[in-house]
Image (cartoon, rainbow, N blue to C red):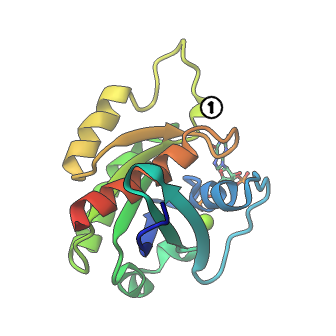
Amino acid sequence: MSHHLDRLYKICIVGDGAVGKTTILHQYVDDKFVEDTKVTIGTNLFIKRITIPEINTRVTLQIWDLGGQERFFAVRPNFYAGAHGILYTFDLTRFYSLINLKKWKDEIDRVVKPFASILIGNKTDLIDHDRTRPVSKEEGRKAKEDLNACCYIETSAKENIGIDKAFFRVAKEIFKSKH
Ligand code: G3D
Ligand code: MG
């Protein structure tokens, strides 16, 4: 059976500086870990084509990353406009990067009503599972509710854990809420 329609989804990845957004995208799109991600000027656009077999649909994901401009309040509203999906990203080793996602959400809510959001806890490779974690799974799940996200996924951009799953999930959720 042929694919009945191709779709284009705009996705924005947000979160504090250094949580791993750009590295996640390089891992997802180029399938490689960039050890030395330079502080980028301007926004980065990444394109990835995926197929969702269950719904026989091809999707082009247009993924926007703020580059180094997380800090610049004035540029961000334009960046969110028209987004179908949001990836809220924090660093599992920095509790405040999770707390700060509330601010990102407030800002996004003023501009757009996305079809789906997900919460990503990145750098799981740095977590020592025998010790108390800076952010517990419970805190992650609680934050997911507060952000109105459909799921919480822990990832490692370094070891390529959970990344494909996260994007696949957000694409499926966008499709479900749009149709
Ligand atoms: P940002 O785009 O959110 O600002 P970056 O974050 O992608 O620039 O990543 C910030 C730093 O975290 C980078 O290190 C990057 O290599 C590292 N990083 C990103 N994801 C992971 C991960 O999953 N595990 C580990 N261990 N490190 C990660 P540098 O040293 O270049 O600042
Ligand atoms: Mg970046």
Number of labelled discs? Answer: 1
Residue 90 visible in the picture: no
The amino acid type found where label 1 is placed reads Leu
Q: Residue at x 67, y 75 (%)?
A: 40
Q: Residue at x 21, y 44 (%)?
A: 145
Q: Residue at x 52, y 58 (%)?
A: 51
Which quadrant holds the C terminus? bottom left
Left or right of 41 in this view: 118: left
Secondary structure of residue under mark 1:
helix
Would the CB of label 1 be found within 8 Å of ligand 1?
yes
Left or right of 34 in this view: 130: left
Percent from the top left, x then y, of residue 28?
A: 64, 55
Residue 41 visible in the picture: yes
Q: Front-most of 63 and 61?
A: 61
Asked where in the image residue 56 lies, by quadrant, the reply is: bottom left
As drawn, 54 above or below 79: above
Percent from the top left, x then y, of residue 70?
A: 49, 72
Q: Residue furthest top?
A: 130
Q: Residue at x 24, y 53 (%)?
A: 147
Quadrant for ligand 2? bottom right
Query: Which residue is denoted by mark 1 in the rendering?
Result: 126
As drawn, 48 above or below 8: above
Left or right of 157 in this view: 153: left
As drawn, 170 above or below 76: above
Q: Front-most of 41 and 109?
A: 109
* Crowd rating for badge 1 (residues with CA inside 10 Å; few <14, some 14–19, many 20+): few
Percent from the top left, x then y, of residue 169?
A: 41, 49
